[in-house]
Amino acid sequence: MTKRIRRREDADPSEGLQKYGDTRFADPTNKKYPIDTPGRIKAAWAYIHQPSNAAKYTAAERRTIQNRIRKAARARKVELPDPAEFVELMKEVRRRKRAEE
């Protein structure tokens, strides 16, 4: 398992710091996926499972990020949602949004 995550060209770590403050991130290199509160832990879990976000990382990097999120969830006794259900829910939300336009 990789512990180091490469610097992404499309990410600006200073934006993560500005938006979330100096907190713990599942991807500390790029300051993505804050894991300091139960809500952020659940959001990080959901977002790393979105295909568009997952595609920005190697399989080893995704495993590292997911393991960091799981560890934070265990520490705070947060139940993580089923990622497949979230991905399907987001597809439905996007479909409805396009239908309204």
Image (spheres, helix red, strand yellow):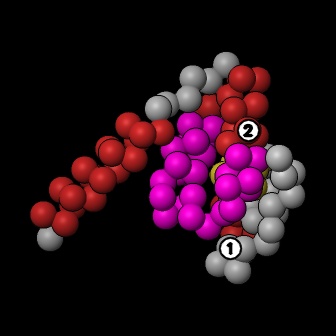
**63 is within the stretch colored magenta:** yes
- Position of 62 with respect to 47 (left or right) is right
Q: Which residue is mark 1?
A: 11
Q: At 48% from the left edge and 54% from the top edge, which residue is drawn?
A: 50
Write the start and end of the magenta stretch as one range. 40-65
Report x, y in % for residue 5: 80, 61
Report x, y in % for residue 59: 67, 55
Whether residue 65 is visible: no
Report x, y in % for residue 99: 12, 63
Instruction: Say how many tags the image has.
Output: 2
Q: Earlier in the sequence, mark 2 or mark 1?
A: 1
Callout 1: SS? loop
- Position of 79 with respect to 20 (left or right) is left
Q: Which residue is mark 2?
A: 67
Whether residue 15 is visible: yes
Badge 2: residue crowd in 10 Å (few <14, some 14–19, many ≥20): some
Locate the C terminus by quadrant.
bottom left
Disc 2 residue type (three-letter): Asn
Q: Is residue 17 above or below residue 82?
A: below
* Frontmost residue, 74 versus 24: 74
* Marks 2 and 1, how far apart at CA: 21 Å
Residue contact at pointers 2 and 1, CB within 8 angstroms: no
Disc 1 residue type (three-letter): Ala
Nearer to us of marks 2 and 1 is 2
Q: Is residue 77 above or below residue 6?
A: above
Q: At 75% from the left edge and 65% from the top edge, which residue is drawn?
A: 30
- Position of 6 with respect to 40 (left or right) is right
